[in-house]
């Protein structure tokens, strides 16, 4: 299932101040919509790094918060959807059963706040645009849709900082 058939690319702008609004952004600290649920690494037992928050398209305000275990030391399983080394917390919603969290509003972050402006992607979106909200995913190798459950594609990020 796809959250929205309309694909948007990200235009990034470093912010001179913390972004506390309930908007799509990268880095900084989460602007929690409800009670905080900061995920912990299954292997290390410490807080994961906050990567960003993303507004979920729809009539009601919903936010998805993305976290990943810090890669400063080797940790197995960051690529496994339920490996305990990455987490997507959706509010309002429930915390997935395979994620352990703590009730802390702030923790480690991938970077300082970066504002995200969403720009509609052209219909001929090419594989070199790998950061998007909505539309279809671009796979690294072959299609790998998760099995079981009611999964929906919301966004994808790439490692490159410039496009």
Image (cartoon, rainbow, N blue to C red):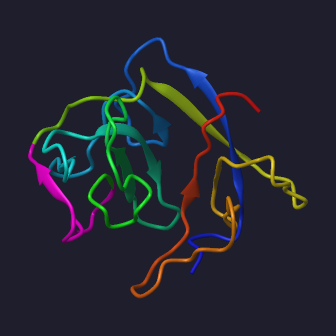
Tell whether 102 sits left or right of 138.
left
Furthest-right residue in this view: 124
Q: Considering only vertical position in the picture, is 50 above or below 124?
A: above
Picture residue at 87% right of the left edge, 61% below the top: 123
Q: Considering only vertical position in the picture, is 17 above or below 86?
A: above
Residue toward you, 96 or 78: 78
Give the residues drawn in magenta, as a range.
Answer: 87-103
Q: Considering only vertical position in the picture, is 79 above or below 93?
A: above
Residue toward you, 31 or 152: 152
| Residue 31 forms part of the magenta stretch | no
Q: Considering only vertical position in the picture, is 122 above or below 13?
A: below
Q: Position of residue 64 (x, y in %)?
A: 39, 55
Tell whether 105 sits left or right of 76.
left
User: Considering the image in quadrants, where does the C terminus appear?
Assistant: top right
Picture residue at 14% right of the left edge, 57% below the top: 100
Picture residue at 46% right of the left edge, 84% below the top: 147
Picture residue at 27% right of the left edge, 63% below the top: 92
User: Considering the image in quadrants, where does the N terminus appear?
Assistant: bottom right
Furthest-left residue in this view: 103
Q: Position of residue 7 (x, y in %)?
A: 71, 59
């Amino acid at each position: 299932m796809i959250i929205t058939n309309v694909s948007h690319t990200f235009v990034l702008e470093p912010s001179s101040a913390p972004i506390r609004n309930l908007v799509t952004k990268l880095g900084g600290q989460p602007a929690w919509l409800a009670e905080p649920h900061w995920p912990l690494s299954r292997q290390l037992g410490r807080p994961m790094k906050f990567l960003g928050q993303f507004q979920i398209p729809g009539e009601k305000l919903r936010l998805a918060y993305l976290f990943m275990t810090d890669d400063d030391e080797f940790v197995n399983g960051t690529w496994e959807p339920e490996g305990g080394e990455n987490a997507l917390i959706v509010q309002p919603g429930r915390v997935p059963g395979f994620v352990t969290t703590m009730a802390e509003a702030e923790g480690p972050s991938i970077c300082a706040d970066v504002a995200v402006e969403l720009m509609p992607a052209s219909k001929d979106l090419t594989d070199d645009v790998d950061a998007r909200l909505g539309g279809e995913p671009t796979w690294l190798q072959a299609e790998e849709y998760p099995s079981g459950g009611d999964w929906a594609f919301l966004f994808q990020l790439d490692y490159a900082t410039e496009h």
